[in-house]
Image: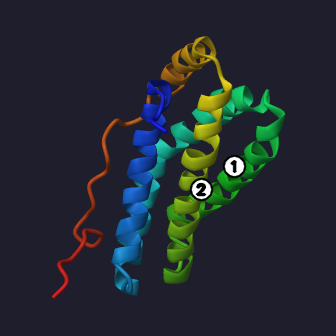
Amino acid sequence: MLRHKILIPLSHQHQHALALCVRIDRAQPIPTADLDAWQAEIEQHFAQEIKIHFSAEECVLFPAARRFPELISLIDELISDHAALRQSFLRAENRSMTVESLTIFAQDLSAHVRKEERQLFERMQELMTPEEMETLGARLQAALKDATHSCSLPNKATSLKSRK
């Protein structure tokens, strides 16, 4: 199903998060010496976009979805995911991630994004009227106004290396 226009800004942010996850996956095995650089990039990504993204979902999107009984358990799962991911972002900020926890973080973030895209967004588009979607869109736009609208650039240690 095509993504409704009001969800496209969230989907673009999801693409940025997935790009980070793919880069972490393709960088395996990550040298311990590069761990601080990866954590710095994760911290920056959270500060510039994901923190605002999570807030917009929790304050605007999830309450709108919660009106539909069939979505309540999914929303509870997504809120739980946000809490766990926030702990990972905090570990990155504190530079306490290990290579293993960095890999798990990328897997968890990727799974979370895909759950929102494939389950939540799809069902919301099916369940909500066009008028409800437009009202939701205006509220989402306001909630996302302070987010960076571009993908963060990797630093030297976190950019993909060519495979020989």
Quadrant where the C terminus sits is bottom left
Task: Give the camera-side residue of 145 and 110.
Answer: 110
C-alpha gap between disc 2 and disc 1 = 7 Å
Q: Earlier in the sequence, mark 2 or mark 1?
A: 1
Residue drawn at x 67%, y 36% as measured from the top left: 58
Image location of residue 42, percent across then percent down: 44, 59
Q: Is residue 131 above or below residue 50?
A: above
In the rendered image, which quarter is residue 18 located in?
A: bottom left
* Circle 2 residue: 112
Residue drawn at x 17%, y 78% as measured from the top left: 162
User: Tag 1: Cα neighbours inside 10 Å, few (<14), some, or many (≥20)?
Assistant: many
Instruction: Determine whether the residue tagged by mark 1 lies in a helix, strand or loop.
Output: helix
Image location of residue 85, percent across then percent down: 62, 58
Q: Is residue 110 rendered to the left or right of residue 67? A: left
Disc 2 marks which amino acid? His
Image location of residue 23, percent across then percent down: 35, 68
Residue drawn at x 46%, y 34% as measured from the top left: 3
Q: Which mark is residue 24?
A: none
Q: Is residue 94 above or below residue 118?
A: below
Q: Is residue 5 rendered to the left or right of residue 96? A: left
Task: Give the camera-side residue of 28 and 92.
Answer: 28
Residue drawn at x 74%, y 43% as measured from the top left: 75
Picture mark count: 2
Q: Is residue 2 above or below residue 92?
A: above
Q: Are marks 2 and 1 in contact (CB under 8 Å)?
A: yes
Image location of residue 37, percent across then percent down: 35, 69
User: Tag 2: Cα neighbours inside 10 Å, few (<14), some, or many (≥20)?
Assistant: some
Instruction: Determine whether the residue tagged by mark 2 lies in a helix, strand or loop.
Output: helix
* Circle 1 residue: 78
Disc 1 marks which amino acid? Leu
